[in-house]
Image (cartoon, grey):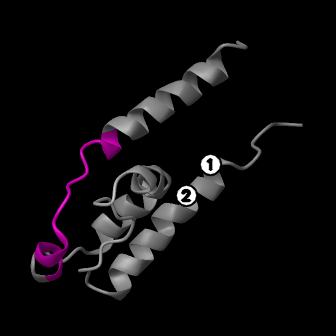
Amino acid sequence: MKLRKPLLFATAIIAALLLASCAEVQATKECLTGRQYGFLYGLIHGFITPLSFIASLFKDDVAIYAVNNTGGLYDLGFLLGSSGWGFMAGNRSKK
């Protein structure tokens, strides 16, 4: 039982890294004239924010936030996705 939590945590980290490795990279000029991102992409971008931030420290072509988005719905999705990290860090132990 003591091994279960670290194993679950390691599995979650590996899954998050695999999902983040599939992130699409676009040039800045293409990003401003290309596809617009909506609520679902905002949610995904918010969820991978910590991983995107770490990657942005080492690579200049990685950004955390999509500049070419649909506005309020993207922002809402991004906010909900990035706030999920706070809920996952909460203490869920039973007393």
**Residue 29 placement, left or right of 91:** left
Q: Is residue 55 above or below residue 45?
A: above
Q: Position of residue 58 (x, y in %)?
A: 41, 50
Q: Position of residue 47 (x, y in %)?
A: 44, 56
Q: Position of residue 73 (x, y in %)?
A: 35, 81
Image quadrant holding the N terminus, namely top right
The front one of 81 and 92 is: 81
Image: magenta residue range: 19-32
Image quadrant holding the C terminus, namely top right
Kind of residue at badge 2: Gly
Residue under the point 29% across and 79% down: 67
Residue under the point 25% across and 51% down: 23
**Residue 50 placement, left or right of 63:** right
Q: How dense is the environment of label 2, judged by Cα within 10 Å: few (below 14), some, or many (20 and up)? A: few
> What's the mark number on residue 84?
2
> What's the mark number on residue 31?
none
Query: Is mark 2 in CB contact (under 8 Å) with mark 1?
Result: yes
Quadrant housing residue 19: top left
Numbered disc total: 2
Q: How dense is the environment of label 1, judged by Cα within 10 Å: few (below 14), some, or many (20 and up)? A: few
Q: Which residue is mark 1?
A: 88
User: SS for tag 1?
Assistant: helix
